[in-house]
Image (cartoon, helix red, strand yellow):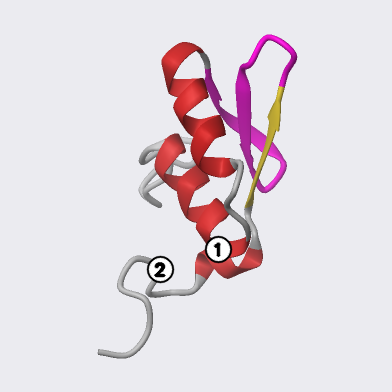
Amino acid sequence: MLGNPIDKRGVLEDEIFTYRITKDRKAFISWHGKQVTVLSGREAEDFIKHIKNADGKDAQLIMAKATGHFKHGNEKRNKRR
């Protein structure tokens, strides 16, 4: 089988996720510049441990997993009725 079964469309190659860690060890994860997730406590510590040595697509995958399924493409659009 060709390609990566996790990222079949190659979306993570564009580095769509970014993150920042605060002094109090919270992790803020953004998607296209918009904050989508804040991790704290044990969840943040696990994220920091995994992201520390990751780069490129591996880091993007870690951030995508940390955000969960926040965007499915079926969100309601603002429609005037």
As measured in the structure, the alpha-carbon distance from the residue carrying label 2 to the one carrying label 1 is 9 Å
Examine the rendering and report whether any part of residue 75 can be seen: yes
Tell me what residue is drawn at x 63 percent, y 27 percent.
Answer: 28
Q: Quadrant of residue 65?
A: top left
Earlier in the chain: of badge 2 and badge 1, it is 2
Which amino acid lies under the numbered mark 2 shown in the image of this protein? Asp
- Residue most extreme to the left: 1
Q: Amino acid at mark 1?
A: Lys
**Is label 1 in a helix, a strand or a loop?**
helix
Name the residue carrying label 2: 7
Q: Which quarter of the picture shows residue 69? A: top left
Q: Is residue 59 above or below residue 40?
A: below
Image mark for residue 57:
1
Q: Residue at x 63, y 16 (%)?
A: 25
What secondary structure prevails in the magenta region? strand
Asked if residue 72 lies in the magenta stretch, the reply is no
Q: Nearer the viewer, residue 75 or 4?
A: 4
Residue 31: % across, % down: 61, 44
Asked if residue 60 is positioned above or below residue 25 in the image, the reply reads below
- Whether residues under marks 2 and 1 lie with C-beta atoms below 8 angstroms apart, the answer is yes
- Start-end of magenta stretch: 22-39
Report the side of 26 relative to 78 (left or right): right
Dot 2 lies on which element?
A: loop
Image coordinates of residue 51 in percent, x first then y, are 56, 42
The residue lying at 43 percent from left, 74 percent from top is 9
